[in-house]
């Protein structure tokens, strides 16, 4: 009897270990390699550097270098940012519907954008002297083109992560690579400012136009190089990934692994045959409509591509709780960064009276803290859910802003060189808190998209990414317009090298109160997020089980 139980236990144990081994082999096979992650993340370096240069310098460049009114510069930037938001769902939808054997859904758009951005970025910062109307029109046209090409790169690029890294942990790690390169891109403009704008301490070379052109040349070359690295480095993985929509359809048709293989295969074939017949009928109706009905609109197939249909999809997506929370929470977080980046140059130049080299050092320290904190947040998120980790990080950032505001109150009682070191430490704390902001919201949104794809069986990652970027770009446009208005309200005058004390106080209030209120609202919004790690892992386990059942069924079909 004991021998019988021993043998039974051994057989059960061996069976379990075989199943476990097969699952591990399958997971390992689908894992994303370090080289691919590295190539994917590299794309964010050039894009991040170029975007941060515009975010940090364009308001100062327009008001203090070109001498344009703050409200007009703010309105110009707000219009282009709003257009960026409107174009995101369109490009996302186009990316989802793109079919290319060579580039897949995303890479072709990214290739076009890499070259277009490199050229347009140089023209943007090469604005010649002229009337206010001429310079405003120059900024408007080339900023609109810049945002358009940004969308052609960024939206497919973000969706590409979901396509090539469907695994929960793999996706978090890939987002980590993306974040590190992005933060390096955020630091780079400050390094370039240190190189091209100022040779000695005490000078304020941030008013020099030539320096901005040199920075633009470096950014354009880097964006082109990094974009090509991502395209070449991920193309093999893109072509190796299965048709996700078809796989999801097969999974929904096979909820039970014990279903008869022939019946399952027939149902799949029938479904695809039906879909093809429907599509052929639609195409036939399209041709008949073009020939015989001039006044009628296109049929249902074309309606699916209209802007109104896409925006209606945005409204439906926004009604879903977790989509809405991440989109709103991240948008409010970015409003805080807009206040800091857009008015930060004004604050450090006209209130603290820092030199260009000191300002670049501060920015390097800020983003250096964000990079240094990545290891911290990666380890914290292993123990706690993403929501708790993000809220804690935002509290750290809020503490750093409060400490920086104290240095602002005491700046008139000491010299700029002395207060500089206190501001440096405070900004490093802000950087540690902001480190989580560059990765966790994106990872949380990717989890929401993954849950939605599993529930519906349709891969709309590009469109969802477009909705995501549309939301925060729209909020950014409103914030930038508001900031431009506030600069005029506090009576900021770019022609004056030394601003009145009341103007300095107004600039401080814009930065500190604006960013603190935005972060507090973001904490409140993210506290409502409802997806946990266990929810995503459960979905992925079920998907793996269904995939295993599929493989088993196909094996029986081949064997029979």
Image (tube, rainbow, N blue to C red):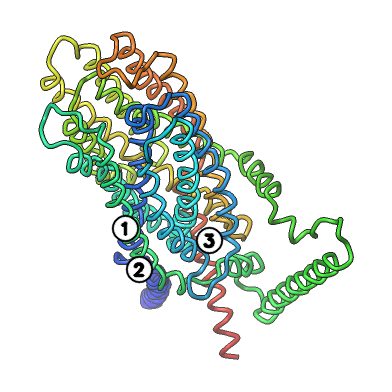
Q: Where in the figure is residue 59, as x and y percent of width and height?
A: 38, 31
Question: Among all residues in the image, which is located at the extreme front?
Answer: 130
Q: Nearer the viewer, mark 2 or mark 3?
A: 2
If you read the primary sequence from the N terminus, does the residue marked by circle 1 or circle 2 appear first? 1
Q: Total marks drawn?
A: 3
Q: Tell me: residue 16, above or below residue 503.
A: below
Q: Tell me: residue 72, above or below residue 55.
A: above
Q: Where in the figure is residue 467, as x and y percent of width and height?
A: 56, 45
Q: Are marks 1 and 2 in contact (CB under 8 Å)?
A: yes
Q: CA distance from mark 1 to mark 2?
A: 10 Å
The residue tagged 3 is 542
Residue at point 60% right, 86% down? 557
Q: Are marks 2 and 3 in contact (CB under 8 Å)?
A: no
Q: Tell me: residue 417, above or below residue 271.
A: above
Q: Quadrant of residue 489?
A: top left
For the question of whether residue 535 can be seen, the reply is no
The residue tagged 1 is 42
Q: Viewer-proximal residue, 256 or 223? A: 223
Tag 2 secondary structure? helix
Label 2 Cα neighbours within 10 Å, binned few <14 / some 14-19 / many ≥20: some
Q: CA distance from mark 2 to mark 3?
A: 30 Å
Circle number at residue 233: 2
Label 3 Cα neighbours within 10 Å, binned few <14 / some 14-19 / many ≥20: some
Residue at point 46% right, 43% down? 143
Which quarter of the rendered picture does the N terminus lie within?
bottom left
Residue at point 22% right, 44% down? 192
Q: Viewer-proximal residue, 495 or 84? A: 495
Q: Judge from the rendering whether residue 237 lies leftward or rightward of residue 258; answer left or right.
A: left
Circle number at residue 200: none
Label 1 Cα neighbours within 10 Å, binned few <14 / some 14-19 / many ≥20: many
């Amino acid at each position: 009897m004991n021998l019988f139980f021993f043998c039974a236990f051994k057989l059960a144990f061996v069976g379990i270990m075989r199943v476990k081994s097969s699952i591990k082999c399958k997971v390992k096979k689908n894992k994303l390699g370090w080289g691919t992650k590295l190539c994917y993340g590299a794309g964010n370096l050039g894009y991040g550097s170029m975007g941060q240069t515009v975010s940090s310098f364009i308001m100062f460049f327009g008001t203090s270098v070109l001498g344009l009114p703050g409200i007009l510069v703010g309105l110009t930037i707000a219009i282009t940012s709003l257009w960026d938001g409107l174009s995101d769902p369109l490009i996302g939808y186009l990316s989802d519907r793109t079919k290319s054997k060579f580039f897949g859904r995303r890479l072709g758009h990214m290739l076009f954008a890499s070259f277009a951005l490199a050229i347009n970025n140089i023209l943007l910062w090469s604005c010649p002297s002229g009337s206010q109307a001429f310079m405003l029109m120059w900024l408007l046209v080339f900023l609109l083109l810049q945002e358009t090409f940004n969308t052609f790169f960024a939206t497919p690029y973000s969706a590409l992560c979901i396509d090539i890294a469907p695994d929960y942990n793999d996706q978090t790690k890939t987002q980590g690579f993306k974040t590190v390169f992005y933060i390096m891109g955020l630091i780079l403009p400050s390094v370039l400012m240190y190189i091209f704008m100022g040779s000695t301490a005490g000078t304020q070379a941030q008013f020099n136009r030539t320096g901005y052109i040199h920075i633009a040349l470096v950014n354009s070359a880097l964006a082109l190089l990094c974009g090509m690295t991502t395209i070449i480095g991920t193309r093999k993985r893109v072509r190796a990934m299965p048709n996700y929509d078809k796989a999801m359809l097969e999974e929904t048709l096979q909820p039970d692994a014990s279903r008869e293989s022939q019946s399952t295969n027939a149902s799949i074939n029938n479904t695809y045959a039906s879909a093809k017949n429907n599509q052929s009928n639609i195409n036939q109706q399209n041709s008949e409509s073009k020939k015989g009905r001039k006044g009628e609109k296109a049929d249902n197939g074309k309606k699916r591509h209209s802007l109104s249909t896409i925006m209606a999809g945005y409204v439906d997506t926004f009604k879903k709780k977790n989509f809405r929370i991440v989109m709103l929470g991240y948008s409010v977080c970015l409003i805080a960064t807009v206040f800091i980046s857009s008015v930060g140059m004004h604050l450090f130049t006209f209130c603290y009276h820092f030199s260009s080299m000191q300002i670049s050092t501060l920015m390097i320290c800020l983003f250096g803290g964000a990079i240094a904190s990545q290891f911290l947040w990666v380890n914290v998120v292993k123990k706690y859910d993403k929501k708790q980790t993000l809220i804690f990080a935002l509290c750290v950032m809020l503490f750093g802003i409060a400490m920086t505001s104290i240095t602002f109150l005491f700046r008139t009682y000491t010299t700029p060189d002395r207060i500089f070191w206190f501001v440096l430490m405070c900004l490093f704390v802000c950087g540690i808190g902001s480190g989580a902001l560059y990765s966790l919201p994106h990872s949380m949104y990717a989890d929401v998209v993954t849950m939605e794809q599993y529930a519906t069986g349709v891969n709309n990652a590009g469109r969802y990414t477009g909705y995501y970027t549309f939301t925060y770009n729209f909020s950014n446009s409103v914030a930038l317009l508001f900031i431009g208005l506030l600069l005029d309200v506090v009576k900021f005058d770019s022609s004056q090298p030394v601003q009145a004390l009341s103007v300095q106080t107004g600039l401080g209030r814009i930065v500190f109160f604006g960013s603190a209120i935005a972060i507090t609202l973001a904490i409140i919004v993210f506290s409502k997020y409802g997806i946990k790690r266990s929810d995503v892992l459960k979905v992925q386990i079920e998907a793996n089980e269904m995939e295993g059942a599929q493989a088993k069924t196909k094996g029986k079909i081949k064997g029979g």
